Amino acid sequence: MVKKKFTDYDMRDDFSFPVYVGYELIEINGIKGIDPDNRYAGLLVRMNGETYLELSDNPTKKDYDSSESIYNGSDMIDTQEDSHDWYASTWDGSLQFVFHKYFKMDSSFHLANDHFGGDISKWIVSDYSIVKQHVLLLGVEQAKLTLDHIYSWFGIFRPEKEWKDMESLKFSDLTFENVKFSLTVGAEGKERHPMHFLEKTAYMFVRLNFDEIQTREFTYRLAVAVRDLFQILTGKAVGISRIVLNSDQSYNRIKENLSPRNEEENWLLNQSFLPDYVEEKISGFAIPYQQISDRFQEILMQYFHDDKLQKLVESYLIVDQFRVPVDTQIITLVSAIESYYRDARYSEGGKKIKCAFKKLERLTALLDDPNKIIKGSTHGNITTTSDLLKEMIDARDYVIHGDKADKYTSEAELVPDLISFKRLIRQAIVNIVSLQVKSNN
């Protein structure tokens, strides 16, 4: 069986590795690694999107006086806030890990014949990297994302082609939170040569390149914004299954050349949204790439620059992705639209729009025939856009303030109309994002 490269693991994988864990690095033959005389055995298990570490130690804070015969809970490390990055290696040395965020679930003194004896502790590791070497770049120069459905959505690469010769799609001069970056869509693939046949697999990635080194936190916010954009354009549940940070060759900014040190990190972290299973189909997209390929650069520039649009998309996807109660969905969606139009003004007089109904009406004005969407949606109680918007606002006001009790029905009766409301919002967002209409906020 061929072993996986460290960059091949993704956030849907389950695995279990016996590891050695160290809290500090020492230099061994010119390379920094875990001190073999100061390391602890452990078991690292990833299962259903969560990563657990069982460790044959219950580590204390750095300033703890080991000569004291008694210590209490305040002397112990509970999270990364009490320490710093930890380091780990599989027992055979084939995989290296850097743990960035972790917190203790349990600890005890244990006598056992199975894993460990003595002090043991159990941890959830919520943010870590699988790496080639433990000393990492302090920041992010680039991030390569593996996203669901984009291979089918772009529809420009095929396994039978030589992906190494394929020209990538590059979009430059983009700005997110006042940071400039470029976005590249490229193809990669693998080949297997079992007896008597050749097996080729092609897939696509989105790479984000920064002019200046960025933080992990910023990089993840941008990655989520990219994911959300593709969810709107594809109309499908897009997850980020892999994030590989930096390059397999580091760039020496002083000597202006590449050094052989591999600074790639396969970054695994707990995400709020990652579909368990993905079935890719080359159909059923909200708007196919071929329809907007000529203006995709402009679409990216507008979307990443417009924080209000990003927030509207985020709020819509929250209720679309998770099992949120009906009342909470209505509150979230109505409030999100009001926030999107918080700076909107009437065309005559230039006065700010404060009326919730007028703000929601502005969004539906971006649709050619909203009444048709409602009538073709579900067997709800409402058949006109105006009545639907009033019903959603009345329900929101009742849930929050207790007002308009006579106009509130029940969650069960609101469900069909809420579905219609969400379809109106989705189509309006698609129209704005794809530049089919001009934003009117």
Image: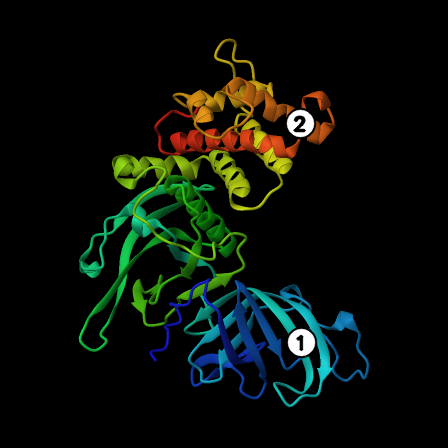
Residue drawn where x is 52% and y is 69% of the image: 46
Q: Is residue 366 visible?
A: no
The residue that disc 1 covers is 121
Which one is in front, 196 or 350? Answer: 196
Furthest residue to the bottom? Answer: 113
* Amino acid type assigned to the residue bearing label 1 in the image: Ser
Task: Residue 341: give x, y in percent of width and height.
Answer: 53, 25
Which one is in front, 283 or 30? Answer: 283
Q: Is residue 392 left or right of residue 158?
A: right
Instruction: Choose top left, top right, bottom left or bottom right for residue 159.
Output: bottom left
205 lies above or below 249: above
Q: Is residue 166 left or right of residue 338?
A: left
Task: Residue 369: give x, y in percent of width and height.
Answer: 40, 21
For the residues marked 2 and 1, what is the alpha-carbon distance in whole angstroms? 52 Å
The residue that disc 2 covers is 409
16 lies above or below 322: below
Which one is in front, 321 or 17? Answer: 321
20 lies above or below 61: below
